[in-house]
Image (cartoon, helix red, strand yellow):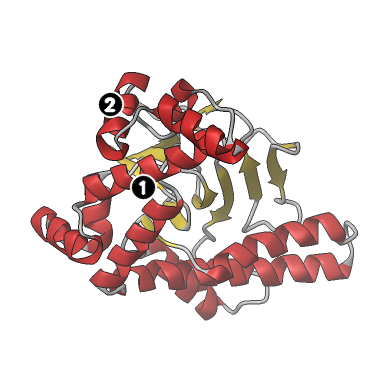
Amino acid sequence: MHKVPTLGCTFMDTPERRVLDLSSELSFLPVLGRSRSAKVREGAVEHRHARCMEVTFCERGSVKFDCEGRVWSLLPGNMFVTQPQDAHRLRVNPKGAQLWWVFFRVPARGEALPSLTPAETRWLVNRLQALPARLFPSTDAIRDGFRDLFAVVDQEPVSSPSRSLRLKMWAVSLLLAVADAGHAGTHVPRDDALRGIIDRMRRAPEAEYVLDDLLAETRLSQSSLAMKFKHLVGLPPHAFLLACRIRKAKELLERTRKSIVEIAVDLKFSSSQHFATRFKQEVGVSPGAWRKRSKEKRNV
């Protein structure tokens, strides 16, 4: 087994990437981060975070994590959690992706989190360390928890009692929301999970949808997934995703000046020729002809 380095963080505070050091204020939540990628950014080398769990929420776009020998696709509205012993890396941070994350430093045995009793701390830590899955649906409480933490950092005076109190309160609330969502995610009814995937494909057809991840999320076999998909939308998963991408392509051709090559890349077609072929098969005309026809209709 090769050695995996234990990495810290490069702290920064820019419009595109905020990685904040909270260790002097919140010893149990030493890192708070948010990224809004204006361009493609390289990922990290494989690493672990000593004594820290990393909790990531994807609000927009999609990213891939390598973790313990598997590839995990993090899509909008989902969470990804790594434990301190997990070797992991973010493959690439694509343009348009928006991620929020924190590091939770697992307290030593007998150590209590601020404002919590040892028994309450032990319960929360055990629940976080016993998450049945690394990847699970997020909740409004998690999204709001991240925003509230940043609001405190940005608006409350440093070293003020109100800042200290609010940071502790929102940090514990966020961790509790993550624990609850992680355990609730394993009990989502299969049809509800499937409808969530269908909704994500409609809203974000440019994301990548890995079959293994869909099977894990729905807890269905491949044949059952295809059958239920076809029952709900009339098409199997791959064909439905293609239809969503073609629909999005029509919107981009009509409303933007993006080139056909750019649209093909954005929507994850293997090449512009593949995009043009599938587009013509589905729509009846080439992407260029569709754009020209749409322009002529607007000028009438």
Q: Is residue 168 left or right of residue 193?
A: right
Q: Is residue 193 left or right of residue 293?
A: left
Amino acid type, mark 2 = Thr
Residue 267 placement: quadrant = top left
Quadrant in the picture for the N terminus? top left
Residue 300 locus on image (x, y percent) = 59, 39
Looking at the image, is 27 positioned above or below residue 185? above
Q: Is residue 102 left or right of residue 85?
A: right
Residue 86: give its label: none
Residue in view at x 17 percent, y 58 percent: 225
Looking at the image, is 152 positioned above or below residue 84? below
Could you say whether the residue bearing mark 2 is in a helix, strand or loop? helix
In three-dimensional space, the C-alpha distance between marks 2 and 1, rounded to whole angstroms, equals 16 Å
Amino acid type, mark 1 = Cys
Residue 83 locus on image (x, y percent) = 42, 51
Residue under circle 1?
A: 244
Could you say whether the residue bearing mark 1 is in a helix, strand or loop? helix
Residue 129 locus on image (x, y percent) = 40, 62
Report if residue 239 is visible in the image. Answer: yes
Residue 37 placement: quadrant = top right
Looking at the image, is 144 positioned above or below residue 24? below
Q: Nearer the viewer, residue 249 or 238?
A: 249
Q: Is residue 275 left or right of residue 165?
A: left
Residue under circle 2?
A: 277
Residue 150 placement: quadrant = bottom right
Residue 213 locus on image (x, y percent) = 27, 50
